[in-house]
Amino acid sequence: MSVVQKDVMDSFIDKVGLQVRTNRMMHGDRERPEIEWAAIAATHMGHLMEAVLKGDRCFIEKELLHTVAPLLELYRVTMGARCSYTTQAVSNLGTSSIRNRNLFDGTPCALKGARTV
C-alpha cells in the first residue's frame, strides 16, 4: 500500500471513529437493533447521493461518515457475539493505540469457523 493510500485510510478510520463517538454522545450509547442501524445508514446514503449529485465535497465527506458510522455499528451488532468484537474496539477507533491494527484478533469470522445464523 502506498504512503498516500495509507494516509487516506488512516484519516478515514480516524474520522469514522470520531463520528461513532460523536453519534454516541449526541444520541446515547444504547444498543439498537440491526434494522435501526440499517435504516439510519440508508437515510444517510440518500443524503450522500444528493451530495454527490451536487458535487459538494464537504457535504460528500459528511454524508460518507454519517453512512459508514452506522454501518460500523451494524457490523458490531451483527458480528459481535460471533467474533468477540467489542464495543470498546469501536469506541477506540481512530486512537493511535490501534492505528496499525485489525479490530479483532485478525482472523475474519468465516475463517474462525464461527457459526452464522
Image (tube, grey):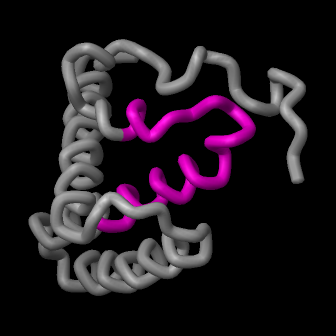
Q: Residue at x 19, y 46 (%)?
A: 18
Q: Residue at x 62, y 42 (%)?
A: 80
Q: Which residues are magenta?
A: 66-90
User: Any magenta on residue 114?
Assistant: no
Residue 57 lies, in percent from the top left, at 14, 66
Quadrant that contains the N terminus = top left
On the image, which quarter does residue 111 sit in?
A: top right
Q: Nearer the viewer, residue 52 or 103?
A: 103
The answer to whether residue 98 is left or right of residue 77 is: left
Residue 52 lies, in percent from the top left, at 28, 76
Instruction: Examine the rendered structure and indicate whether residue 10 appears above or below residue 73.
Output: above
Q: Nearer the viewer, residue 108 or 51?
A: 108
Instruction: Examine the rendered structure and indicate whether residue 8 appears above or below residue 55.
Output: above
In this rendering, the count of numbered labels is 0
Secondary structure predominantly adopted by residues drawn in magenta = helix
Q: Residue at x 19, y 84 (%)?
A: 54
- Residue closest to the far front: 30
Residue 100 lies, in percent from the top left, at 35, 13
The answer to whether residue 7 is left or right of residue 37 is: left
Q: Residue at x 70, y 27 (%)?
A: 108
On the image, which quarter does residue 15 sit in?
A: top left
Instruction: Examine the rendered structure and indicate whether residue 47 appears above or below residue 87.
Output: below
Residue 3 lies, in percent from the top left, at 25, 16
The answer to whether residue 16 is left or right of residue 18 is: right
The answer to whether residue 14 is left or right of residue 31 is: left
User: Any magenta on residue 87?
Assistant: yes
